[in-house]
Amino acid sequence: MYKIFSYLLLCTGILIICFSLHSMYQVFAESRQVPAFVQAQKMQLHTQAGPVELPMDTINTLVNVGLFVLFMVVVAGIGAKIAGLGCQLLKNERIHDALLQLNKIPPAEVLKKL
């Protein structure tokens, strides 16, 4: 009954995990540009020696890469939860089918505990 839905959830979860891994691979191995989540302007500090200008390009890059990795880890975790849900549904359906083949269907209270 739920086999198609459970396989669909399993495949969807695996595809989401593969998408996040592929996106991280493109950023780190193929040097694809990271989406700009944070864009800080150049900062100018006034010191005793005079004004000092701090370039924020490196800090922007590091923060954007960190946020991108964090976002992709969250996306991969969501995919893992979806795939796990599909596995649980598939396991329950297989147990139910095995009990049907044996013609030994336990009472509803026992099935709810599975």
Image (spheres, grey):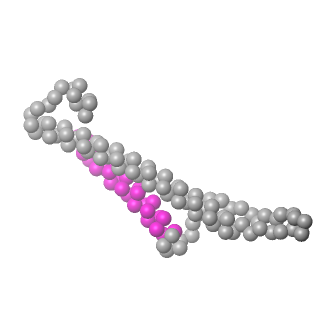
Residue drawn 11% across and 32% down? 104
Q: Is residue 5 something one can see in this rendering?
A: no
Residue drawn 58% across and 63% down? 65
Left or right: residue 29 compared with residue 91: right
Residue drawn 25% across and 34% down? 114
Where is residue 42? Give x, y as percent. 76, 66
Identify the residue at the far bottom of this view. 30
Left or right: residue 23 compared with residue 63: left
Where is residue 74? Give x, y as percent. 49, 52
Q: Nearer the viewer, residue 75 or 9?
A: 75
Where is residue 15? Give x, y as percent. 38, 57
* Magenta span includes 113: no
Q: Main secondary structure of the magenta part?
A: helix
Residue 60 is drawn in which quadrant?
A: bottom right
Left or right: residue 64 compared with residue 23: right
Residue 43 is drawn in which quadrant?
A: bottom right
Residue drawn 14% across and 36% down? 99
- Magenta segment boundaries in residue numbering: 1-27
The answer to whether 59 is drawn above or below residue 81 in the figure is below
Where is residue 70? Give x, y as percent. 53, 56
* Magenta span includes 2: yes
The answer to whether 86 is drawn above or below residue 20 in the figure is above
